[in-house]
Image (cartoon, coloured by chain):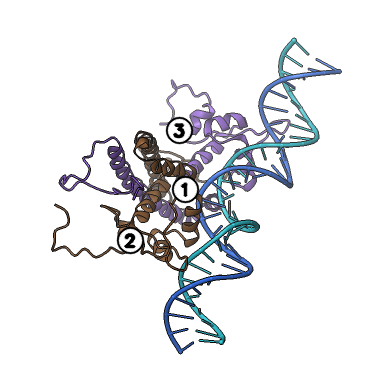
Chain colours: A purple, B brown, C blue, D cyan
Amino acid sequence: MATPAHVESRLRTCSEVFDHPVGEPDRTARHTISEVAAASGLTAHTLRWYERIGLLDPVDRAAGGQRRYCDADLHRLAFLGRLRLTGMSVADMLRYVDMARRGEQTYEDRRQLLVAQREEVRQRIADLQATLSVLDYKIDLYAGRIADSTGAPAVCTYYRGEEEQSA
Amino acid sequence: MATPAHVESRLRTCSEVFDHPVGEPDRTARHTISEVAAASGLTAHTLRWYERIGLLDPVDRAAGGQRRYCDADLHRLAFLGRLRLTGMSVADMLRYVDMARRGEQTYEDRRQLLVAQREEVRQRIADLQATLSVLDYKIDLYAGRIADSTGAPAVCTYYRGEEEQSA
DNA sequence: GGCTTGCTTGGAGTGCACTCGAACTCGGTA
DNA sequence: TACCGAGTTCGAGTGCACTCCAAGCAAGCC
């Protein structure tokens, strides 16, 4: 049922893996730090720093001591990027990663952490959507598309009066 | 057409104004710094700092030098809070406020700034919603509600394989 | 051999947005 | 009069998340 024979099974590029981190990750250490930096949007500095503080497990090395990242590293980076996007602190990401290292016994703890984070994300989306309508209103106001101070029926006047600090 | 006579027209409280900054703001300086702190969620320290750096115009003072905020100050604070929520930097908020001080001639500039910010907010919402589905997937995974490695038809396997760092 | 490029390290530095401290003033009350 | 609590000032400090630096190494090329 896995990969049909006629599908080429070459190793995927760094960006391919990072942008679409699905399936069983290949464990071949083969991506250089600059490839991973380009794919992830993080700097090489930041990638080394993530490893130093323990967000990434020690990365494999080529002869000469250079880092070679495998697909599993990219999977983790991609997910950490998602968590960071939600506003999760590095300290909390570390907590999550430490749990992941402790294996199945932390499934429930991890689930709870993610459920809490999901709630925060939902709240954040709601806040942003409320902000969006304030921005819409202000933009229309500046474009002169809102007849001001005429008794237009029930027009939203959010933040009217903030425009000019005269008086 | 304005305020019918039978509607009581007492001055609104600090929280009322901050939470619902609509209509022409009253210019009576009457809210203490701790009231504004409670209503806005900012600390008194931060309110003074906002004024020091110019995000707020110099606030009126009671005899004795204590600050008394008016409704217009609260309107501005409420809108600044919205901008901050979008991730706008204090430096950019300052730019916006400086434009507002220069009056009508900056309407177009301000509109453009807000349009750009609106685009960022939309992008941010999209990112967060994508993250939400990743979180949903992971949460289900941890709850054991996803039959792993069985050939379930086209199940999303985002980030599968990131769970355990064994191997 | 000499040069360039890309990588290595640990520690120090940066920028942001607050956050706090210390010393002081004011108005009210027991 | 003594004290309290809420407020004042400005400069300094904090925590976070990078970001950079200097010195060095290894491989590849002219």
Which quarter of the picture shows residue B16?
A: bottom left
Q: Secondary structure at mark 3?
A: loop
Q: Secondary structure at mark 1?
A: loop
Residue at 50 percent across and 60 percent down: it is B45
Residue receiving disc 1: A87
Residue A101 in percent (x, y) is at 57, 50
The amino acid sitting under disc 3 is His
Residue at 31 percent across and 64 percent down: it is B13
The amino acid sitting under disc 2 is Thr
Discs 1, 2 touching: Cβ within 8 Å: no
Residue A162 in percent (x, y) is at 33, 48
**Of the residues tagged 1 and 2, which is closer to the observer?**
2
Residue receiving disc 3: A20
Which quarter of the picture shows residue B63?
A: bottom left
Residue B57 in percent (x, y) is at 43, 52
Residue A157 showing in the rendered view: yes
The amino acid sitting under disc 1 is Gly
- The answer to whether residue B60 is left or right of residue A97 is left
- The answer to whether residue D30 is left or right of residue B165 is right
Residue receiving disc 2: B28
Name the subunit of mark 1. A
Query: How far is disc 1 from disc 2 in space, using C-alphas?
Result: 39 Å
Quarter of the figure with the N terminus of chain A: top left
Query: How far is disc 1 from disc 3 in space, using C-alphas?
Result: 22 Å
Q: Nearer the viewer, residue A144 or B104?
A: B104
Query: How far is disc 3 from disc 2 in space, using C-alphas?
Result: 57 Å
Position of residue C8 relative to residue A158, above or below, is above
- The answer to whether residue B116 is left or right of residue C8 is left
**Of the residues tagged 3 and 2, which is closer to the observer?**
2
Are both tags, 1 and 3, on one chain?
Answer: yes
- The answer to whether residue B91 is left or right of residue A165 is right
Are both tags, 1 and 2, on one chain?
Answer: no
